[in-house]
Amino acid sequence: MTSPLEGIRVTEFANFAAAPSAVAIMADLGAEVIKVEAIGGDPIRGLMKQAKVPEGAHNPDVAFQFINRGKQSIQLNLDEPDGSDIARRLVAASDVVVMNLLPERRDRFGLNTDDLLAMKPDLVIGLLSGYGEVGDEIDRPGYDVTAFFSRSGLYGASTPPGGMPPHARPGQGDHTTSLAFFGAIMAGLRARDVSGEGQVVESSLLRTAAWTIAIDLSTSLVDGRPNTERTRDRGLSPMLEAFECGDGRWIHFTMPDTGDAWPRFCRAIEREDLLENPDYETGRQRFRAMGALVADIEDTLKSKPSEYWMPRLDEHRCIWAPINDTASAVQDPQVRSTGAFETIHHPEAGDFETVAAPFRMHNAPDVGVRGPAPRAGEHTVEVLSDVLGFDAEEIADLTERGVVASD
């Protein structure tokens, strides 16, 4: 075996970010992926923030490249009977079908799960939605800001009393959900291989968000009380806070106030005098004095640049990390050493880096980005002819009638 998913064909009826990025990982693992796009292409094309490139250079649409690398693209009009028929024929030729179509649209196009399993009994069907497949709101559209961050309680728990809800970064909830969805599809494939029977698996932005905030939700399930972010002067410990250094760089500490953590912390920041202060003798006393103590420590760390503090923090075995901006993160040696980035070789934009799948397989070396994302409809003719057996005359007729479109 050179690739874990070699020989698996996936047909994707999905746009935007969550479902397609799960399928991108499958492409990295060797699956053949056919992305079905509406005529005109996935609406996320060109929609997200673009990288700054030299004037006259080809902009590679880096967000779309990340989400759809290594796939083939066919443009298909599902509202046309011949278009939905082609869609079902692609399903019959696939091992996995991935959809983020709402139930009403699946029914309209003849792509509901019962129809598909009747057509191919060993099919694995992956359904991705904002709010799940049961309940009164299954037809409610949802992006990650609404279904993932807002509805789940995540924003509420991240907002200090009287404060404004935070902003998420683009796709953050989508790409978290894509990992849950990817795992569900892999479990479905395993169950199919064992039983020989098709499987329907699903994931949603809302349910995945509940998993990410499980500790807070678990306590609310028992006591019925909301969990909220603490203001800085009401934090649990100064060793669980972020501080700005003299060069403007921030350092975040995560050191539970147990054992000898407090003495090590004080020695690292050259504040042994805090160990002699009777008001800071115990963790409870330090908690009660958080406002004054944080302000005092903040002044200390601001007195010297981060390069001064960092080696001292390591010397005293503190648990800390610099707060990188994105430009710093992509140059961070440890981020790079994990294999977090891979290169896409693009025929027009040249070589550029993208974010790799968030895991490694040590004994499967042929895993990684297979190529750039496709142009809309780039493989329409190839898929129709090679996968479904249409001849050139039939493809020309379908194109003329607006059932399919090519790049």
Image (cartoon, helix red, strand yellow):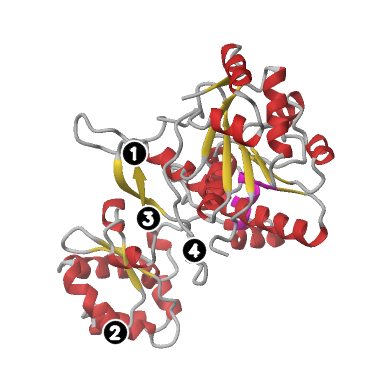
- In the depicted structure, whether residue 92 falls above or below residue 338: above
Q: Which residue is mark 1?
A: 347
Disc 4 residue type (three-letter): Phe
Query: Which mark, by number, is residue 316?
Result: 2
User: Which callout, 2 or 1, points to the residue nearer the camera?
Assistant: 1
Q: Quadrant of residue 243?
A: bottom left
Marks 2/1: CA–CA distance: 50 Å
Dominant SS of magenta comes to: helix
How many badges with numbers are in the image?
4
Q: Which residue is painted at 70% across and 20% down in the image?
A: 82
Region of the chain picked out in magenta, as a range: 202-211
- Comparing 186 with 260, the one in front is 186
User: Which callout, 3 or 2, points to the residue nearer the camera?
Assistant: 3
Question: The N terminus lies in which quarter of the figure?
Answer: bottom right
Disc 1 residue type (three-letter): Pro
Disc 3 residue type (three-letter): Glu
Could you tell which of marks 3 and 1 lies nearer the N-terminus? 3
Magenta region includes residue 209: yes
Q: Which residue is mark 3?
A: 342
Can you see residue 291? no
User: Which callout, 1 or 4, points to the residue nearer the camera?
Assistant: 1
- SS type, badge 1: loop
Marks 1/4: CA–CA distance: 27 Å
Could you tell which of marks 3 and 4 lies nearer the N-terminus? 3
Disc 2 residue type (three-letter): His
User: Which callout, 3 or 1, points to the residue nearer the camera?
Assistant: 1
Marks 4/2: CA–CA distance: 31 Å
Tag 3 near tag 2, CB within 8 Å:
no
- In the depicted structure, whether residue 117 falls above or below residue 79: below
Q: Which residue is mark 4?
A: 359
- Comparing 218 with 342, the one in front is 342
